[in-house]
Amino acid sequence: MATTNSPTTTGPLAQPGRLPQPSAFLDVRDLRVHFPTDDGVVKAVDGVSFTLERGRTLGIVGESGSGKSVTSLGILGLHRRGHTRISGEVWLDGEELVSAPPERVRRLRGRKMAMIFQDPLTAMHPYFTVGAQIVEAYRVHHRVSRAVARRRAVDLLGRVGIPQPARRVDDHPHQFSGGMRQRAMIAMALANDPDLLIADEPTTALDVTVQAQILDLIRDLQDEYRSAVLIITHDLGVVAELADDILVMYAGRCVEEGSAQTLFRRPEHPYTWGLLGSMPRVDRAARDRLVPIKGSPPSLINLPTGCAFHPRCPHQGRDGIPCRTEVPDLAQGSDHGVACHLPPTERRRTFAEDIAPAL
Amino acid sequence: MSTHTSPDRTTARPGTDELLRVTGLEKHFPITRGAFIRRTVGAVRAVDGVDLTVATGETLGLVGESGCGKSTTGRLISRLLRPTGGSIVFDGRDITDLSVRRMRPLRREIQMIFQDPYSSLNPRHTVGTIVGAPLRVQDIPTPHGVKRAVQELLELVGLSPEHYNRYPHEFSGGQRQRIGIARALALRPKLIVADEPVSALDVSIQAQVVNLLDDLQRELGLTYVFIAHDLSVVKHICDRVAVMYLGKVVEVAPRDALYATPLHPYTLALLSAVPVPDPDRRDRAQRERILLTGDVPSPVDPPSGCRFRTRCWKARERCERETPALRELAGGHLVACHFPVEDAERTPRGRIAAHLAAADVAPATTTPA
Ligand SMILES: Nc1ncnc2c1ncn2[C@@H]1O[C@H](COP(=O)(O)OP(=O)(O)OP(=O)(O)O)[C@@H](O)[C@H]1O
Ligand SMILES: Nc1ncnc2c1ncn2[C@@H]1O[C@H](COP(=O)(O)OP(=O)(O)OP(=O)(O)O)[C@@H](O)[C@H]1O
Ligand code: SF4
Ligand code: SF4
Ligand SMILES: [Mg+2]
Ligand SMILES: [Mg+2]
């Protein structure tokens, strides 16, 4: 099924690990993050694999609770080890992080990889000035004087579009508007020129006009620094704007992956169809009705058997496929992975004939 | 260009049944200083001269950036807040200054649905108590008992009658929002003011609730004021849309007219900023996107004349001097701007020019509120 009308995708998106020597800049292999709780084990992430190159953007989409943030925190090594069972491999520029000592991962954080969160106030301290916090972030990894670090802070604030950075550098976070705080946090994340930037819902709390500014900024910075960007969002519009490749998560697993064009033009997983059908679109004539996904997301403690999506899937059991009993693999073609028991020809026919006309 | 998909989604035609008329509506929140002797040192002009009409059976969308006064307008219309100026006429009655007591019978007719399905439901009460409360408080006669009435309401919003004895925490976000809707419907209101009713929900659940609101409107002849910041949802659900900026309505139009031919520069910028869920069109969308510089000014001290002038790429001297009035430029299409957007500015070339011009506006350097 090697359909290659997306010139931007080269080679497989993910190769579940056998080769010890990864070629990709970021190579996540069979990542699992489980939380033992009183009610049982929460399998928040249960076997996710993908690769990401420098200069490219991968978008992770999925509903609330599907494991997007837990995946990114797993890459950054931010889960509390005592309370979390993590397995799998995370290779960053040839170095494996899951088995690396915490101290080593901590040193990489902020320098080689950095994160932008949804809520800047959780990442910034209210009592220190914006400048002091950027200076601090920079000096952790660079042995320079405060004066030099401060010049760097002013420079970064200007770079992310804060007007009069030399003056605003001494403001406290609460003196900034929401959009400016988001910019300041991006400045802080960029302090050490990270090669990997993880943005978890970077614009969800922002107005659409501010969101457009921030997405524009992320795009510019990526062009300039050629960093690898992982953007996590539930907003399909935002991924379509930013991502080269997209990974769709459902209940802790990847159900579909491919280039952005592939996922929007020829999606093959019934859950992806559901997401697209649910979404009202500003760029189309208004439809009479949306096509929602029925039911609600499953419990991650007692996952449905077989395909976790089967209780909500309109195609479940069609032509005798084993949806209730067998977990579908993420069948990987050269550029499009789909975890569904429906035969590929059947999926494409269904999308073309039944789904696409109603979108 | 979009076309009408159903005949009832057209303009609130003049002469159709007007359910609500809001004129010059104002809400100024005083800012006070001093611990012992409190003095008023200024006011947040949250709503500052809003004019709106809503016809029976239609859905009016209210959009605009955070802090522009949407929720305050909604709370004034529902009379959860008392206006500091202007008037509200509901179903032919002036309700602007009605006391709490005189307002009570009208409470039945205007209900509100809130954004947060988590905090707006009391966690210690069962679904039955929550949905039945308005019936009990208002002493509504229920021929088959309150329980039956509540169970019918639960079915109406797609929940099961067995949910009667359950607690809110046992429900998902979408289900909780249905509970909030059932509670709002208990008194058979004429008007529902829905403040961001789907913003906190996941896209798949959001679609369920949007369809539910649509069905209920059709079945019960409801009228909605739908407050939202998501312009795609508003396009889907509203017949007409009012755009607010800094406490004022800057544009009102039938849905399709607003999205296809926005007349206010702010509306043009707002629509261009919506992410396009189509990777093949993103380059074009980015070239034509109007990125506003700077932040929304403070409602404590709004700019003179046109409030958008500090971010408007079309601003001229007159905009600073003279406040533009909301006037009708085409059938049912009202705009408050001295130099409304022209057709040429909506062509690809015009949009690229606007993109460049907007980037050149020097950002205002005042600290936002
Ligand atoms: N420390 C923890 N202990 C137990 N469960 C957890 C923990 N952290 C996350 N979870 C659970 O793991 C699941 C995945 O959470 P995650 O935050 O990754 O979701 P998400 O996809 O980012 O959702 P959202 O869109 O709401 O941010 C959720 O069900 C969450 O409740
Ligand atoms: N009780 C109050 N006292 C003082 N100021 C208030 C009060 N309520 C609202 N405001 C201010 O009035 C302005 C309008 O607020 P409002 O909540 O109506 O905005 P909104 O358009 O609903 O914004 P959002 O999209 O963030 O919900 C804001 O500047 C807000 O800070
Ligand atoms: S495997 Fe079966 S239940 Fe799962 S998505 Fe495919 S058709 Fe639906
Ligand atoms: S009145 Fe002037 S400043 Fe205001 S929107 Fe129109 S052109 Fe811009
Ligand atoms: Mg998350
Ligand atoms: Mg509000």
Image: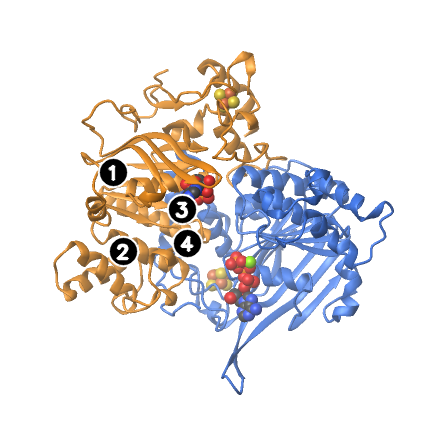
Chain colours: A orange, B blue
Read off the residue under disc 1. A55
Give the crowd class for mark 4: few <14, some 14-19, many >=20 residues within 10 Å: many
> Disc 2 or 4, which lies upstream in sequence?
2
Determine which quarter of the picture holds residue B82.
Answer: bottom right
Q: CA distance from mark 1 to mark 4?
A: 24 Å
Three-letter code, disc 3: Glu
Read off the residue under disc 2. A188
Q: Is residue A116 above or below residue A46?
A: below
Three-letter code, disc 4: Val
Read off the residue under disc 4. A210
> Disc 3 or 4, which lies upstream in sequence?
3
Q: CA distance from mark 2 to mark 4?
A: 18 Å
**Labels 1 and 2 share a subunit:** yes
Read off the residue under disc 3. A201
Mark 3 CB in 8 Å range of ligand 5? yes
Between circles 3 and 4, the one closer to the viewer is: 3
Q: Is residue B80 above or below residue B144?
A: below
Residue depicted at x 27% and y 66%: A169
Mark 2 CB in 8 Å range of ligand 5? no
Q: Tell me which chain the residue with mark 3 is part of.
A: A
